[in-house]
Amino acid sequence: MRETFSKRHGFSNTEETDITVREDAPAELRSFFVQLCYDCGLTPTNLRGMVCQALKRQPDRNNWSDFPNVDNEVEDLLQGCKWYKVYDIIERLHDFLAESRYDRDVYNHYVTELNEYFVEFGIGWKLVAGRLEMRGPESFEVVVKNAKEAEHETGHTTASKELHQAIADLSRRPHPDPTGAIQHAMASLECVARQVTGDVKANLGDILKRHNTLIPAPLDQAVARAWGYASENGRHLREGREPSYTEAELIVGLCASLSNYLIKKTQSSSPDGRSEALF
């Protein structure tokens, strides 16, 4: 795809808008999606086939011409369907572009433009490896991304999987799983703490007590209290005390940040820069 004027000249940095949309697909998004598909080379007839498959509807046989008839039909189908079906169709289109004759530039254009739209218009989703995942504020995204990369590069595979599952729990629709997100986020941090201390059987609470230089005071007390909160609301849930989505998002971001900190601290303390037990 040819670069636009604004991107060539550095005017196109997408400014983040506060996330206001998760369990919805605004009319503007639905219309933008149609235009993006056309921009990627699909015809209204192509797009109608995929939309009808996703919605389990039959194309209108009386509509023959792409414009305006089939185009109007596609728009009507998308504007009239349930919000989560729009995201099903977005993923279906991704798979089509990834597997078909369309070149890589078209595929990249689809993913980039869609994710930029989400950021610019406050939609709390992002397209990652063909699947829509929960998106947090930019600071949250940076922290989680850095933690995932650090865990992957240093061989903390279990921790990385647990962090990925925490994000998946926040992404569940129609009902997110805050309890599961907290549980998996803390498990991710616990995996990292065990590996960097060599205390492979202890839980995080005990590790914090035994290794008092792991996290500098008084921050260690804050982490210990977060662990206690997670134990109450993630591992040993009590009736009527289910954590909120926002609380779970906070814990996931906190655990990701702490995991990244411990890995980087261990690497900087190791003579060869490798992650090993030093505490």
Image (cartoon, rainbow, N blue to C red):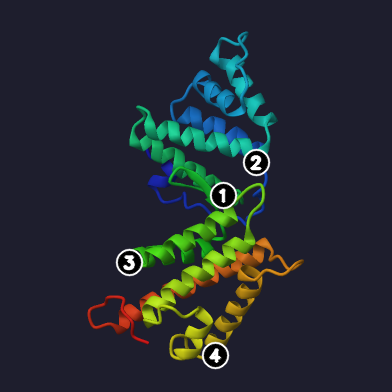
Decide if residue 256 is in sight here: no
Query: Under tag 3, what secondary structure?
Result: loop
Counting from the top left corner in percent of width and height, residue 260 is at 42, 72
Camera-nearest residue between 43 and 206: 206
Q: CA distance from mark 2 to mark 3?
A: 38 Å
* SS at mark 4 in the image: loop
Mark 3 → mark 1, Cα distance in angstroms: 28 Å
Q: Which mark is residue 25?
A: 2
Q: Amino acid at mark 4?
A: Pro
What type is the residue that disc 1 sits on? Trp
How far apart, in angstroms, are the residues tagged by discs 4 and 1?
A: 35 Å
Q: Check residue 155 in the rendering and tell me which mark sits there, or answer none.
A: 3
Q: Which quarter of the image is occupied by the C terminus?
A: bottom left
User: Hey, which quadrant is residue 272 in on the image?
Assistant: bottom left
State which quarter of the image contains the N terminus: top left
Question: Callout 2: helix, strand or loop?
Answer: loop
Residue that badge 1 annotates: 125
Mark 2 and mark 1: Cα distance apart in space: 11 Å
Q: Earlier in the sequence, mark 4 or mark 1?
A: 1
In this rendering, position of residue 267 left or right of residue 146: left
Give the amino acid at mark 3: Gly
Q: Along the polypeptide, which appears first: circle 2 or circle 4?
A: 2
- Image height check: is 240 above or below 175? below
Question: Residue at left 61%, top 74%?
Answer: 231
